[in-house]
Image: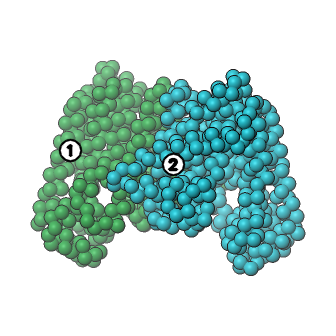
Chain colours: A green, B cyan
Amino acid sequence: MSLEAFTAQMLPAVEKELQRLVARLNAPRTALFHEMLTYHLGWTGEGAGPAATGKRLRPLLLLLTCAAVSEAGNQKEEQGEEAWHAALPAAAAVELIHNFSLVHDDIQDNSALRRGRPTVWKKWGVPQAINAGDALFILAQLALLELENRLPPAIVLRASRILQEACLALCNGQFLDLDYQEHADLTLEDYWPMVAGKTAALFSACAHLGALLGGADEALQEAYRNFGHYLGLAFQVQDDYLGIWGEEALLGKSTASDLMEGKKSFPVLCGLEKNGAFARRWKEGPLRAEEVALLADLLAQESVKLRTLETVDAMTDLALKMLLQADPSGAAGEALFELVNLLLRRQA
Amino acid sequence: MSLEAFTAQMLPAVEKELQRLVARLNAPRTALFHEMLTYHLGWTGEGAGPAATGKRLRPLLLLLTCAAVSEAGNQKEEQGEEAWHAALPAAAAVELIHNFSLVHDDIQDNSALRRGRPTVWKKWGVPQAINAGDALFILAQLALLELENRLPPAIVLRASRILQEACLALCNGQFLDLDYQEHADLTLEDYWPMVAGKTAALFSACAHLGALLGGADEALQEAYRNFGHYLGLAFQVQDDYLGIWGEEALLGKSTASDLMEGKKSFPVLCGLEKNGAFARRWKEGPLRAEEVALLADLLAQESVKLRTLETVDAMTDLALKMLLQADPSGAAGEALFELVNLLLRRQA
C-alpha cells in the first residue's frame, strides 16, 4: 500500500473523529461557537473544502508511525490497521493542538488571512478568537482521553504526558518568536530553540505517540521521537526557504514573502549573521513591496539561499538516519519514507 | 482544626506546588516568560504579595473536600492529611486553570487592572498575554499528571476527564458571556447557562476532584459535585451583588461598578426583565459615571436588590443541602461548612 492509499484511508477517519469531537459545541445557545471551529477547520463557510482544511500532516505522521511499528511487531498488516484505528483519538488531538496554535498565532501575528480565507479573529473579533483557540485546545485534551476506550490507563497517561510536554515546548517557542520581534541582534543560535519549540516539538510528539501507541519499546520510541524532531526542523527550514524563494513568495503578491512580514526566519537570521548588504538594509526598517525581490537576490548572492537548502538537506539526512535506525517495516514503513520525501521536496 | 488552621497548612503547600510547576519556564532565554507568570500569580513585580495572589479558593475547596472524604472513610485525621497531600497536584491544576482563564479574560474584557495591578496584556502586550495564558493552561495539565506519582492511573485519568469537562464548560460560558455583549434581549434564563459554565463548572470540579481523590464512591462524588455547582452559582450571584451594591462599587470609584462595564450580571438581567425605569435607561446605551448610584437605586426600588440576595440565599441553601447529603465528617468537614459561610457572607 502506497502513501496515497494510506492517506486515503487514514485522513477521512481523522476528519470523522474531528467532526465528532467538535460537535460537542453544537448546542442551541452555542451554535455560533461551533461554527467558528468548523469554519477554522475548513468544513464550513466561504472557501470551505480541501484547500481550507490544511494537509493534516501531523495526524498522518502519527498514524503511519503507529501502523509501521505495530506491523513490525506483529508481522501482519491487519495488526497495523487495528493499531492505527485505536490511535485515532491521539491523531485528532495533535491536529486540534496544531489548530489551537494557528488560531492564537493569527491573532498574535495580526494575520488577516489563513489559507486564503479570513482568520477567525478577523471574522469574529479577538475575544471570541482567543476563546475559540482555547476550545480547540480543550477538545484536544478530551480527544486524547478517549484512547482509554481501547488502551490501558498507564499508556494513555504516558501519551498525555508526551502531548503536554510538546505543548509546553510549543508555548516556549511561541514566546521566543514574539520576544525576538523586540530584538535586532539575533543569530542562527537563536533560531534553533525557537523552531525546536514552534515546529519540531509537535512533529516529534506525533512520531513518539505513534510509536508508543503502536507498541514500541522505549528505545524504539526514542528513535521515532528523534525522527520526528529532525523532520520538524527540516520542515520548518524548508518552509522558511519557500517563504522567500517559493513560487508564491516570488511570483505571487509580495506580501506573501516572509521578508515583508519581518519574520525571523532561517534565511533572515543567516543573512544577519553575514552582516553584508542584506543585513544593512534589513536593519534600516520595514521593506517596501518593490524591494522584496532585490533583498531575496541579495540573500542568494550572500550564499544564504544555498546554505538554507544545505540545511534542509542536513536535517532531512538526520531525520532519515533516525528513521533507518527505527527500521520501520511493511507498507506503512515505506509510506513513512515516502512522506519524508514528499514533505521535503515540496514547492508550496 | 478550624478553617483558618487548615488554610494555614494547605495554602502554603499549594503555593510551593505552583512555584515548582511555574519554575519549568525559568530557562535562560525564557526568563521574561517566567516573569509574566510569577507576576500574574502575585509573587513578583509591583504590588506583589497576599493581596495580589487572590484567595486560592478553588484549591482550598478541593483539598478540604479531599480531607473530609478521606477522614470520613478512615475515621482518622492523619488519613485525611495524607490524602490531601497526594491531591496537591490537582489543587495546583485548578488554580492554574482559574488563572489561565483570568489572563485571557482580562484581554477579552479589555481590563487594564486586576487586583489593583496592571494586567499581563497591559504590561507585555496582547500577543504575549495570550501565550502566557496558554502556558498556565498547559502547566495545569502537567500538574494533574503528577497525581500519577501517588495514585493509580485509572484514577488520574478520571481526574483528568473531570478537569477537561470543566474547562470545556468554562469555555462555553465564556463564549456566552462574549456573545451576550451583542444582544440586548436577554433574560434571567440566559444567565444560568453562562454562570454554570463561567463559575460553577470549576467550583463543581474542585469538589468532585476532592471527593474522587479522597476515595469517595460514585454517589458521594455526585453529592460533592452538586455541592460545588450550587456553591459556584451562589458565589457568582453574590459577586454580582457586590459588583453593584458592594462597598467598593458604591463608595469606591464608580468604574468599580459592574454597571459601568455593562456586564450582563444577575441584577442587570433581572432589571431588564422588570422592564421598568432601569431597563429603559440601560437600553439607551452606556452609563455616565455620575448615573451609577442612581441606577443602583432604581434597581433596588424595583426589588432587584432583594431578589438578588434571595437568590444568593436560595443557591446557598441548595449548596448546604448537598453538603449535608455528602455528610462530611471530622474537622475538615466542619471547615467546609465554615468555608461556605465565609464565602457567602463576604462583603468584598
Report the side of A294 relative to B58 (left or right): left
- Chain holding disc 2: B
Q: Quadrant of the C terminus of chain B?
A: bottom right
Mark 1 or mark 2: which is in front? 2
- Chain holding disc 1: A
Q: Amino acid at mark 2?
A: Phe
Tell me the crowding category of disc 2: few under 14, some 14 to 19, or many 20 or more residues within 10 angstroms, Cα based.
Answer: many
Could you tell me residue A1's position as x and y percent? 29, 32
Q: Which residue is mark 1?
A: A316
Q: Amino acid at mark 1?
A: Thr
The residue depicted at 71 percent of the width and 79 percent of the height is B288
Report the side of A227 relative to A108 (left or right): left
The residue depicted at 84 percent of the width and 63 percent of the height is B304
Residue A257, compared with residue A10, is above or below; it is below
For the question of whether residue B231 can be seen, the reply is yes
Q: A117 or B66: which is nearer to us?
A: B66
Could you tell me residue B180's position as x and y percent? 67, 62
Q: Could you give the CA–CA distance between mark 1 and mark 2, rounded to whole angstroms?
A: 33 Å
